[in-house]
Image: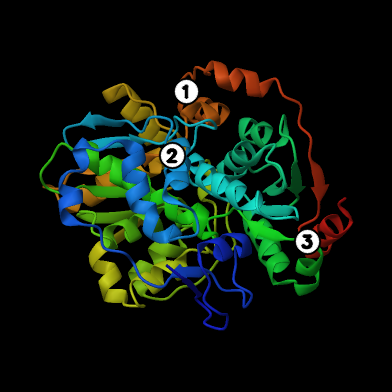
Amino acid sequence: MNYYSLVQKSPRVNFKEALFQGQAPDGGLYFPDHIPLLNKNWLGAIKNLEKEEIALEVMKPYVGKCIPEDDLYRICEETCSFSFPLVAIHDKISCLELFHGPTMAFKDVGARFMSRCLSWFVQHENREVTVLVATSGDTGAAVASGFSGLKGVNVVVLYPSGKVSRFQELQMTSGHSRVTALEVSGTFDDCQRMVKEAFADTELKKKRFLTSANSINVARWLPQQIYYFLAYKDWPCEKPPVFSVPSGNFGNICSGLVAHASGLPVQHFIAACNANKVFPDFMESGVYSPAQSVSTISSAMDVGDPSNFKRILELFHHNYAGMKELISSYSVTDHRTAEVIWDVHHKYGYLMDPHGAVAFDCLQTYQDLHPDEKGIFMETAHPAKFGEIMESTTGVPITMPAEMSAVMKGVKQSTPILPEYSDLIDFLWNKD
C-alpha cells in the first residue's frame, strides 16, 4: 500500500513515510492509493473473531510490509485492549460506547495505534521525533497518554485556551513525560492552522523531525475503522445499521466511510454536527464555505474548516450525488443538545455526553424520515468529562469515576502563546 498527496505534487510514499511526514511536502493530506476489499467469507465470520484479529485484518493492507505481521498483531492487541460495548437505548437506537480506554474517549484507538507504530519505527532511528498536534480536547489527552514517555519521541500539543473542559485540560497538561502543552489564546481552527504552517515550513523541518498525531496522519485516522467493524460484530439485526457520528474534523466518519468502501455493510451514515454546520450546509447546497468556528457545549466538534472534508471528497471521486446517497447531515443547537441529554436520561436511564447527544438527535431526525431504519450513534467520550457543562445545562447529577478524580488532582503545566505562527515557531526553534 502506498499513499499519495491530495494536492498531487509530492511522490507516493509507504505507510512508514506517511506516518513520519504526517502531511505531504506539498501541503496535501495523504490518501491510500486503493481501498482494499475485505473477503466476504471473513466478514461473514466476524462474529466469531476476537477484537485484535479484526483489527489486524483491517489494518494489515494499510501497513503493508512496513511492520512484520507478528509485531502488527501485538500493536493491534494493545490498541484494542479495552471494551467497546454496544448498548441498546430502545428497540431502534443503540449506542456504541467508545470511552472505555485510558482517556475515556474514542481518540484512544487512533492514538494508541499510531504511538505504538511510531515507537516500533523509532527504535531503528538515530534521531528524535517531535509529534505536533492540535486539539479541541480529546485528541490532546489521547495523544499525551498514548505517547507519554516513549523513548525518542517528544509531543507538543496546541489547545484553545478556555475552550476545553477542565478535565480535558488536566489530562493533557499534567503527569506526562516528554509532553508539552501550548495554550493558545484562540480557537481550534487557529491551532490547526498553526500546525499546518509548521509542516509546510521547510526550514523548521530541517531542524526538527516533525510528524502529526491529528487525524491528518494516516496512522491516527485509518485505525478508527476498527470500531465500526466491532460494532457490526455485535449488531443483532440482519439489516445493516445506520451510523450517526459526532463530526468535527470529520476523521471519524471518514474512517467509517473507508470501512464501508472496504465491504463493511452499512445502511447509511449521518454526519452529526452542532452549530458549526459547514458540512450540513454543503450537503444541502453543494457549495463548501469554511467559516469561523463558534463555541458550543459539544466543544470537540467546534471546527469551521474540517481537514478531512477533502478526504471524503476524494473517497467519492468528488461525486456530490454519490455522497448524498450515502450521507445525511444535520445541525443541532446547544439548547436542543441539553434537552436531548435530559430527555434520554429520564426516559431510558441512559446518560450521554453533549457530543453523543448531538449524534442521538440527528439519528432520530433521520429515523423520522426513514421509520423502518435502526441505527447506532457513537458516544465518543465519557459524560463525566463534561460534568460542569452537563450539570449546569441539564440539571443531571454527574458521578465522577475514580480515574477522573485522580486526574483532577493534577497540576496544570502549560505555556501560553498567541494564535500566531511566529509564537509557535519561536517555541519549536528554541526548544532544547
Asked whether, in this view, residue 194 is left or right of residue 389, the answer is right
Type of amino acid at the residue the image marks with label 3:
Arg
Type of amino acid at the residue the image marks with label 2:
Thr
Q: Position of residue 410 (x, y in %)?
A: 72, 24
Q: Which mark is residue 380?
A: 2
Q: Position of residue 386 (x, y in %)?
A: 54, 31
**Within 10 angstroms of label 1, few (less than 14), some, or many (20 or more) residues?**
few
The colour mode here is rainbow
Q: Closer to the N terminus: mark 1 or mark 2?
A: 2
**Within 10 angstroms of label 2, few (less than 14), some, or many (20 or more) residues?**
many
For the residue pair 355 and 155, the one nearer the viewer reads as 155
Query: For the residue labelled by badge 2, is the local secondary structure a helix, a strand or a loop?
Result: loop
Q: Are marks 1 and 2 in contact (CB under 8 Å)?
A: no
Q: Which mark is residue 395?
A: 1
Q: Which mark is residue 208?
A: 3
Residue at left 73%, top 61%? 209
Q: Position of residue 224 (x, y in %)?
A: 42, 49
> Does 147 sit above or below residue 200?
above
Q: Closer to the N terminus: mark 2 or mark 3?
A: 3
Question: Could you give the CA–CA distance between mark 1 and mark 2, rounded to whole angstroms?
Answer: 21 Å
Asked whether, in this view, residue 407 is left or right of residue 52, the answer is right
Tell me where residue 403 sits by quadrant. Answer: top right
